[in-house]
Structures are given as structure tokens and as C-alpha cells.
Image (cartoon, helix red, strand yellow):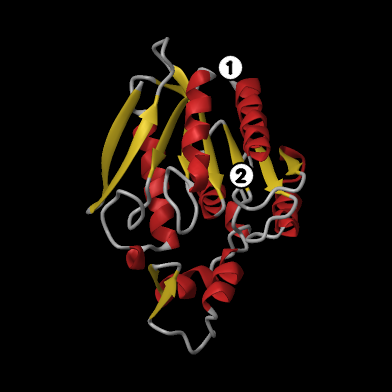
Amino acid sequence: MFQNLELYVGDKLIRGDVRLPDHGEKFPTVCFFHGFCVDRIGLMRLHELFARRCAESGVACVKFDFYGCGESDGDFSEMRYTDEKVQAQAIYEWTKNQQWCDTENVFLVGHSLGGAVVSNIAPIVQPKAIILWAPGNYVYYDISSRVHAVPGNYQPFYDIGGLTLSSEFLEEVRRINIVEDAKGYNGKVLIIHGEEDEKVPIYASGLYMDMYGEKADFKVIAGANHQFSAVEWKNKVYDLSIHFIKERCQ
């Protein structure tokens, strides 16, 4: 079953959807969070196809567009990393209050910047487990290089692929130690990274591995890029993620 969703986080209206399995009353549930410059559908439907695979496997999947992205209100120039953390936590709490959610089995999954967000709210909400697809702890360097931003001499706004990016986002995220802020999560972690990731270099996941230690499992998709933009790569990411979730369901 598919449902469109709307949720106010403070005065910000965000929009999303949930896919539920066809049979049953309560389900293990994934809250999925998209990355930078994309939305809850994902490039080449990366996120949407994952949600469908979840539902086929007996797992509900909730996806929202962050404020300023996709169908949510706001402009991309208003997007801030700390706001996305607040929205992600609100989505998690909303999800746990739904009658179809098995509250003992709620998982957070995020891609790229969404993976960074997941890692940073996990110590606060303590979900059953988390999955990070090419987590964007390298985001400041990637985005700065893409717009040729010069610290100390930022332009007010940058054109990034037809979207308007505020320098306030760069100033904010430059001062955040994303991996340090991920400390304190007690559950299991699966990190999946493409071998040929051109946005978040695969070596960046080493910082997470050092921090999580034995709690984390690291999987590399041979030849894959940042968006896992091949059917074979997508299927490997989906299979690894769903297997990890199912193994941990009570």
C-alpha cells in the first residue's frame, strides 16, 4: 500500500510517502533519508526502488523530501544541515507513532548527506540499527570543490546544477565534525560504499569504521559510483540492506 504524507516540523512543511507490505498489521520499518541536491525518489529512482523492495520483503519504508527539496515547501537556498537533522528526528518520532510501525524494529537508512544525517541522529534516537550508503562525512569538501568556494571569501549564493545554494550552508557544515557527532550510537551499523565513488571517496568511510569499531560492517560494491547507477549495483545495495534488516528483526 502507498500513502502520500505531509508533516510540519516547526513551521516547515515537508512531504513524503510510505510504502507498506500488502499483508500484516505491524511491520519492521525503515526511515530513508536522501542526499544533497536530490529527493526521496533518487537519481534513476534509486530510493524509490529500494522502498518497493522493502515492502516486497515485509518491511515498511518511509521517505520524505527535506525542506527545500523535492515536493516539500521552501527553496533549496534555505536548506541547512542542522535543519535536516531536526527534520530527520521528527520523521523518526512520527514513524514510531504510526499504528503499522513495529516500534521495536525501526531502522534508519541514508544515502550520501542523508547517511551523515542518519549517523548524527542515531546517538539521540537509538534506532534498532542503521545503514549508511556512501555516507557524506566528506560533504564540505565535495560541495566546496564543485562550486569553487573560497573560505573567507564566500559568495552569498552559488549555482549548483540549477539549484541555489546558500553560503550559509557551507559555513555551517564546515564547522561540524560529522564523524565526531556520530559517537554514542549503541546499535549495529552497515556501511555500503561504491569502489569508484566520485563524490565521497571510499577512504572517507574509514573514519566511520575507526569510530564505530566492531559495531560496523563495511561492504564495497566493486566498480560502483556514488549513485550506484547500474542495475547490478542497485540490486547489491538493496540485497545487502534488506538482509541486514531482516537479520536484526526480533
- The percent position of residue 250, horizontal first and vertical second, equals 58, 17
* Closer to us: 224 or 61: 224
Q: Residues within 10 Å of mark 1 (few under 14, many from 20)?
A: few
- The percent position of residue 78, horizontal first and vertical second, equals 33, 65
- Any part of residue 80 in sight: yes
As shown in the figure, which amino acid type bears the numbered disc 2? Leu
As shown in the figure, which amino acid type bears the numbered disc 1? Gln
For image coordinates 75% across by 51% down, the residue present is: 195
Quarter-wise, where is residue 164 in the image?
bottom left
- Any part of residue 125 in sight: no
- The percent position of residue 207, horizontal first and vertical second, equals 72, 57
For image coordinates 67% across by 52% down, the residue present is: 225
Compared with 89, 17 (above or below) is above
Compared with 3, 178 (above or below) is below
Please tell me whether mark 2 sits on a helix, a strand or a loop: strand
For image coordinates 52% across by 38% down, the residue present is: 108
Residue position for label 2? 132
- The percent position of residue 94, horizontal first and vertical second, equals 34, 35
Quarter-wise, where is residue 25 in the image?
top left
For image coordinates 47% across by 45% down, the residue present is: 33
Single out the mark in the foreground, 2 or 1: 2
Please tell me whether mark 1 sits on a helix, a strand or a loop: loop
Q: Residues within 10 Å of mark 2 (few under 14, many from 20)?
A: many
Looking at the image, which residue sits at the far bottom?
A: 153
Residue position for label 1? 250
Comes first in the chain, label 2 or label 1: 2
Say whether marks 2 and 1 touch (CB < 8 Å): no
